[in-house]
Image (tube, rainbow, N blue to C red):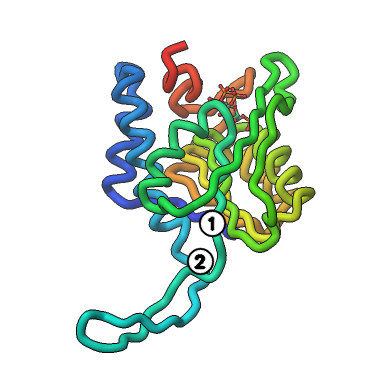
Amino acid sequence: MKNVTVIHHPLVQHNLTRLRDARTQPQEFRRLLSEIAGLMTYEATRSLGVKKVSVRTPMEKSAGVQLEKEIVLVPVLRAGLGMLGGILEMIPHARVGFIGLKREETTLQAHFYHKSLPKNLSRCEVILIDPMLATGGSAVAAIDFLCEQGAKSIHLVSLVAAPEGIRRVRKSHPTLPIFTAAIDRQLNGVGYILPGLGDAGDRLFGT
Ligand code: PRP
Ligand code: URA
């Protein structure tokens, strides 16, 4: 699928398998999710723009580069929090915004309950973080809101994506880059990803 990158790196796939495993308990689930998010960050940030700078080493002047734009990470609460720490380890200077969305169990509609974003999003690279892209309703709501707030460049990082969710994001945002560790088979009748890993928020926080 266009602009969808599946990260096949063996460390990513190894961790994903352990996250899928129903026997993995919250403590280990948290560690693995954070670690895999860090690994996925390499791929998700590969195309970020850099500008040339010069730097003075202890020996002489050297050519170098620095990131062109500021980076803003936006985890979707709750489950996105499980990926935040690992990504911040890779990009410690990033600013962080939060979007609270809860998918209603029967209608599968996502409802906002929290929004807080840094200013000047239009000048930033925004990385939207949510481990699960299921129907795509939460992702589209979050992306629409980020666009309303001025974001011009958004990357979506989702650990597991359903084809239905990718199609929904594609329909509203045809060129937005999506990074995932797996495109799973399908959604079940109540909007869960198959084979998936269950309810990411519940597994993360032991609820
Ligand atoms: C989960 C998940 C996504 C959303 C995906 O969150 O973390 O945000 O569902 O589903 P969708 O693509 O069909 O919208 P949930 O709303 O269950 O909240 P939680 O993270 O607090 O558990
Ligand atoms: N949210 C989850 O946490 N898991 C799914 O499979 C679908 C939505």
Kindly check if marks 1 and 2 are in contact, taking CB atoms under 8 A apart as contact. yes
Left or right, 108 with reference to 95: right
Q: Position of residue 26 (x, y in %)?
A: 35, 19
Mark 1 Cα-neighbour bin, 10 Å: few <14, some 14–19, many ≥20: many
Can residue 1 be seen from the camera position used here?
A: no
Mark 2 Cα-neighbour bin, 10 Å: few <14, some 14–19, many ≥20: few
Q: Is residue 147 above or below residue 108?
A: below
Q: Nearer the viewer, residue 65 or 57?
A: 57
**Which residue appears at 70% of the width and 41% of the height?**
140
Q: Is residue 107 above or below residue 60?
A: above
Instruction: Name, please, the residue furthest toward the top.
Output: 207
Q: Is residue 19 above or below residue 43?
A: above
**Which residue appears at 36% of the width and 85% of the height?**
63
Of helix, strand and loop, which one carries label 2? loop
Q: Quadrant of the N terminus?
A: bottom right
Instruction: Name, please, the residue furthest toward the left.
Output: 59
Decide which of tag 1 and tag 2 comes sooner along the chain. Answer: 2
Q: Position of residue 38 (x, y in %)?
A: 37, 46
Instruction: Tell me the tag on residue 71.
Output: 1
Of helix, strand and loop, which one carries label 1? strand
Q: Quadrant of residue 37?
A: top left
Left or right, 74 with reference to 173: left
The amino acid on which the numbered mark 2 sits, given as a three-letter code, is Leu
Q: Is residue 69 above or below residue 102?
A: below
The amino acid on which the numbered mark 1 sits, given as a three-letter code, is Ile
Q: Pointer 2: what residue?
A: 48
Distance from the alpha carbon under mark 1 to that under mark 2: 10 Å
**Which residue appears at 58% of the width and 53% of the height?**
155
**Which residue appears at 60% of the width and 42% of the height?**
97
